[in-house]
């Protein structure tokens, strides 16, 4: 079976680990990763979501943190601080730096981000084909108003420095409107047997991938069933601050509202957590098949069970 999953960072990566445990060796998984969180620092290109997927599936992730490398050291960051060079709020460790150096060196030499990602995966062997959503630069910016007035900040500044404590007034994936899907993205979607939306952020992760012209259309037109898993449980994000960015796009932070926002033109099936069982009828009434199953990714086996439920629902809604 050919499975395509659209994925953001921590939530997406943890779901994919469960998916890999749920499928067999004959199944092929293509992951289309969000690159809207990418940030350029010290002349280096940092791709947090691609790296989180790569490290998580490749066994190099810092498990408790969910991002960055295990057994990390921080000499470079300390040295930068001595030079008075920031940003201090963004934690790039020494081991992680190596990834950004290799990536940036290859990009400067003329390789595309998809080629670089493939090369990095030779080391990490994530067990999936990891494709960036686009080789073109896309950067999510967030409009906020604070004591400095109304301005746009990079998504990482909003998320990491400001902890999403200021209201997000607008979320703009800068560059997405002219970006092209990376090679292989549209083909993978068209040829998939199942398309999954993991419990990633519906606005800044899945939403940004869908904002690349052609991707939303390809998913909607794909013959494969599309099944999503709610990132919202009991009215709150499982992790992260998805509710803050959902408010910016006028969507309530409920499992039902997120399903309806994707809509029946895009998703055929939707999984909510058992605590949200009461929303199943409303989602089904909107034309999306819905089931309530445990959606807490407490360990790999619990996550594999979620993946099995998503694949089973896909079979039930197969056109
Ligand atoms: N998240 C944080 O909360 N603080 C950090 O300092 C931080 C640094 C960082 C460096 C590399 C990387 O790949 C991820 C990093 N993250 C950090 C995670 C990241 O900000 C977000 O969780 C994702 O972009 C959202 O998917």
Image (spheres, rainbow, N blue to C red):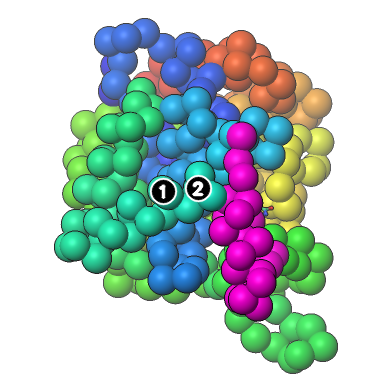
**Few, some or many residues within 10 Å of mark 1 (<14, 14–19, 20+):** some
What's the CA distance linking mark 1 and mark 2? 5 Å
Image location of residue 237, percent across then percent down:
74, 43
Confirm or deny contact between disc 1 and disc 2 (CB under 8 A).
Answer: yes
- Residue 108, relative to residue 182: is it above or below? below
- Residue 284, relative to residue 145: is it above or below? above
Q: Which residue is mark 2?
A: 96
Give the main secondary structure, helix, strand or loop, of the magenta stretch: loop
Residue at image coords 72%, 41%: 239
> What residue span does the magenta drawing correspond to?
71-93
Residue at image coords 41%, 54%: 100
Q: Which residue is mark 1?
A: 99
Farthest bottom residue in view? 149
Pick the residue in front: 66 or 133: 66
Pick the residue in front: 135 or 145: 135
Residue 193 appears left or right of 187 = right
- Residue 72, relative to residue 105: is it above or below? above
Tally of numbered discs:
2
Image location of residue 171, percent across then percent down:
58, 69
- Mark 2, ligand 1, within 8 Å: the answer is yes
């Amino acid at each position: 079976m050919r499975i395509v999953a659209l994925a953001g960072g921590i939530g997406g990566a943890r779901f994919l680990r469960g998916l890999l445990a749920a499928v067999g060796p004959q199944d092929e998984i293509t992951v289309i990763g969000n690159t809207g969180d990418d940030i350029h620092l010290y002349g280096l290109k940092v791709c947090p979501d691609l790296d989180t997927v790569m490290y998580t599936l490749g066994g190099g992730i810092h498990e408790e943190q969910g991002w960055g490398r295990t057994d990390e050291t921080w000499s470079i960051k300390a040295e930068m601080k001595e030079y008075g060079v920031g940003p201090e709020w963004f934690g790039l460790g020494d081991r992680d730096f190596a990834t950004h150096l290799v990536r940036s060196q290859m990009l400067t030499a003329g390789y595309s981000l998809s080629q670089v990602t493939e090369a990095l995966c030779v080391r990490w062997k994530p067990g999936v084909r990891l494709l960036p959503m686009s080789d073109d630069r896309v950067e999510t910016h967030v409009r906020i108003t604070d004591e400095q007035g109304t301005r746009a900040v990079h998504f990482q500044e909003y998320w990491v420095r400001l902890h999403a404590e200021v209201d997000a007034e607008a979320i703009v994936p800068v560059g997405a409107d002219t970006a092209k899907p990376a090679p292989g993205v549209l083909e993978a979607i068209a040829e998939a047997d199942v398309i999954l939306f993991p419990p990633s952020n519906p606005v800044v992760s899945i939403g940004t991938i869908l904002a690349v012209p052609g991707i939303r259309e390809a998913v909607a037109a794909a013959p494969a069933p599309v099944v999503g898993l709610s990132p919202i449980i009991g009215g709150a994000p499982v992790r992260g601050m998805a509710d803050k960015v959902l408010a910016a796009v006028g969507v309530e932070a409920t499992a039902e509202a997120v399903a309806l926002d994707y809509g029946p033109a895009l998703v055929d099936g939707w999984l909510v957590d058992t605590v949200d069982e009461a929303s199943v009828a409303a989602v089904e009434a909107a034309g999306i098949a819905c089931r309530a199953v445990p959606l807490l990714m407490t360990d790999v086996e619990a996550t594999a069970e979620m993946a099995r439920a998503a694949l089973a629902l896909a079979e039930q809604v197969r056109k």
